[in-house]
Image (tube, rainbow, N blue to C red):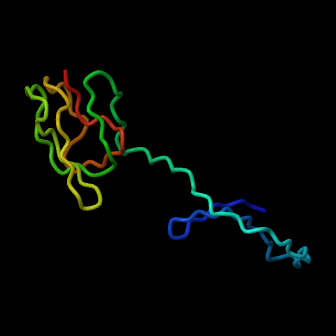
Amino acid sequence: MKRLRITVEGVAYDVTVEEIDATSPAAPSPAPVPRPAAAPRVAPPVAAAAPAAAPMAAGPGAVPSPLAGTVVSVDVSVGQQVEAGTQLLVLEAMKMNTSITAPQAGTVASLGVAAGATVVEGQVLVTLS
């Protein structure tokens, strides 16, 4: 028997599935045991898949992605001076654009992504020094 979690319309159900070998005669199954109905449980969050490119290590000045999405444009270049609030790049997720801005003034030390790249939440996009 296998225990599986199935989600239907946002509600998670834990189920037990019996595997039957089609080549052997079916064994009589035991009578079903009635079980009290339990409140549906919410499935725990699923970890995001690893990005195609390895993300840079987060450190001082790192600007992480607040969400998973696709980079629409990168509006700065390495060595460029930026002020707090300057738009660094634009991410698209679920047909909505999100502007990623500099949290503080500094110099763009490195770019971790390029236009068209797919990113995961927490991946370092830009590093400021």
**Residue at 34% in and 41% down:** 53
Horizontal side of residue 124 vs 107, given as left or right: right
Residue 32 sits in which quadrant?
bottom right
**Residue at 15% in and 27% down:** 108
Q: Nearer the viewer, residue 42 or 27?
A: 42
In the rendered image, the quadrant that contains the C terminus is top left
**Residue at 23% in and 58% down:** 96
State the image coordinates of residue 20 (x, y, percent, origin top left). 79, 72
In the rendered image, the quadrant that contains the N terminus is bottom right
Give the answer, above or below, for where 73 lies relative to 37: above
Residue 76 sits in which quadrant?
top left
State the image coordinates of residue 48 (x, y, percent, origin top left). 45, 48
Horizontal side of residue 67 vs 127, given as left or right: right
Horizontal side of residue 123 vs 85, given as left or right: right
Horizontal side of residue 3 vs 65, given as left or right: right
State the image coordinates of residue 54 (x, y, percent, origin top left). 37, 37
Give the answer, above or below, for where 104 lies relative to 74: above
**Residue at 25% in and 24% down:** 61
Looking at the image, how many numbered discs can be counted on the residues?
Answer: 0
Give the answer, above or below, for where 70 lies relative to 53: below
Give the answer, above or below, for where 34 lies relative to 52: below
Residue 55 sits in which quadrant?
top left
Q: Nearer the viewer, residue 70 or 8?
A: 8
State the image coordinates of residue 42 (x, y, percent, origin top left). 57, 57
